[in-house]
Amino acid sequence: MTAPFPQFRKIPVPFLGASLGLSAPREARLPALYGAPENAGEIISGHRPLVVGNGAVGGAIALHMARLQPAALFLTDPKSFKEESILTQPIDPVSIGKPKAAEIGRRCKAISPNTEVHVFCGSIQELDLAELAGTTALFLATDNIAAEVEASQIALRLGIPVIHAAVHGATTVAQVRVFDIGREPDSPCPACLLNAEEITQMNEQATFPCDPGSVTAASARDVQTAPTVSLPNLCSLAADLAVMQFLKLALPFGTPVGNTMLEFCGHTGKSWLTPTGRNPNCSCDHLAWQIRASSRPNLADATLGDLVRDFVVDPGSGATFQIAAFDWLDRTACPTGHHESPVRRFVPELQPIEFPPCPECQAPVTSPPLARRNAVFSESLGNAIDTPLRELGINSNPPWIRFDFADRTALLLSA
């Protein structure tokens, strides 16, 4: 299943790599790992990991994953490299001042031209969840607690595992936590392990939308974080361990790593592998979404009632609908109260709509509070639930439609 990626930028094949035909086959160096399946390379090829945070730890993870040559690689980071970045991060001086996601993405594409590399130079809070449908694992390597919580919720919605890598420079500790989301029904998520102090810090730095499943630009916040202060080799060690734990989870082989925390301390030279568990008071909703690709050539030609029935649900049972890049406009009104007109159509999201002035007072006509919203209840649609979306203002095939039923949430992706 592959979703469109309008927010991501696809990295083209580098001219040098294309001209020389560079793309050494993975099998030239991939060992026959003890206990791993014989088709280990094929399994790796099917993966589409997302790396959140592309600095000292995440950048090294991304480059390692590129060398493993997965089908696709998604990178997101809102920051750019600074002069100090060269002290801990896998770059050279020419990278200073460049966006982290774009620069690491360029390097990944040069290493593996056959891998689709998509980069987003922004925070994960700004990404629409539907953009990430089809990703198979989430590497988390950020120093932003709000981003950790948002990433946790995304992984839970999509039902994909999380590999969270971090370092503590002063104690020379490299830590990797694996959350086997999607396969273990009671799996914890990164937010489950936040302590009271971290939750307080998060609440002081950022606010979140009313809907915890909403991943939109409205939820993005400029959160100030401290730079990673660590030995460079400790950062790369955390990345190395994260990729190892991913491979052990994905193939699998060796000691099971699902829902564990691996720590290595340079001071003592010791390592620990500790199980982790679900926090019943976790701030994230641990309910996975039902995600499927539509068999219809164009969702705009269908009615919402048709699409609900595709999920084997009676349209009359009640649902909330949200369509990508569109708001529902119920009515317009004159601010002086002379005039009110029903609209009952979808209109482009965030786009101002001009209406004819009030015929009585000539005042500008606008949408009253709550008359324009990004989601609409089935009860509010009336007969419009059986009207083709094209006749309700959806002129092109929307990339996704979200359905909130009483007992579950479903995400329908366009063909």
Image: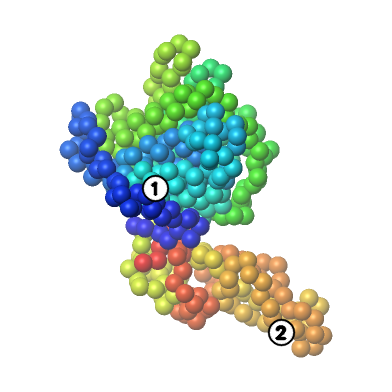
Residue indicated by mark 2 = 356
Q: Is residue 210 visible?
A: no
Residues at marks 1 and 2, CA–CA distance in whole angstroms: 51 Å
The 10 Å Cα crowd at callout 1, few under 14, some 14 to 19, many 20 or more, is: many
Closest to the observer: 365 or 284? 365
Q: Looking at the picture, how far across and down is residue 336, in whole percent? A: 81, 78
Q: Is residue 320 visible?
A: yes
Q: Is residue 323 above or below residue 363?
A: above
Residue furthest left as drawn = 38
Its colouring scheme is: rainbow
Upstream in the sequence, badge 1 or badge 2?
Answer: 1
Q: Nearer the viewer, mark 1 or mark 2?
A: 1
Residue 302 lies in quadrant: bottom left
Which amino acid is tagged 2? Pro
Checking the image for residue 109, the label placed there is 1
Closest to the observer: 326 or 316? 326
| Label 1: which secondary element | helix
| Label 2: which secondary element | loop
Residue furthest top as drawn = 268
**Left or right of 346, for residue 65:** left
Q: Which residue is drawn at 61% across and 51% down?
A: 219
Q: Which residue is drawn at 56% across and 49% down?
A: 122
Q: In this view, does 212 lie above or below 55?
A: below
**Left or right of 44, for residue 300:** right
Residue 26 lies in quadrant: top left
Q: Looking at the picture, how far across and down is residue 31, in whole percent? A: 22, 32
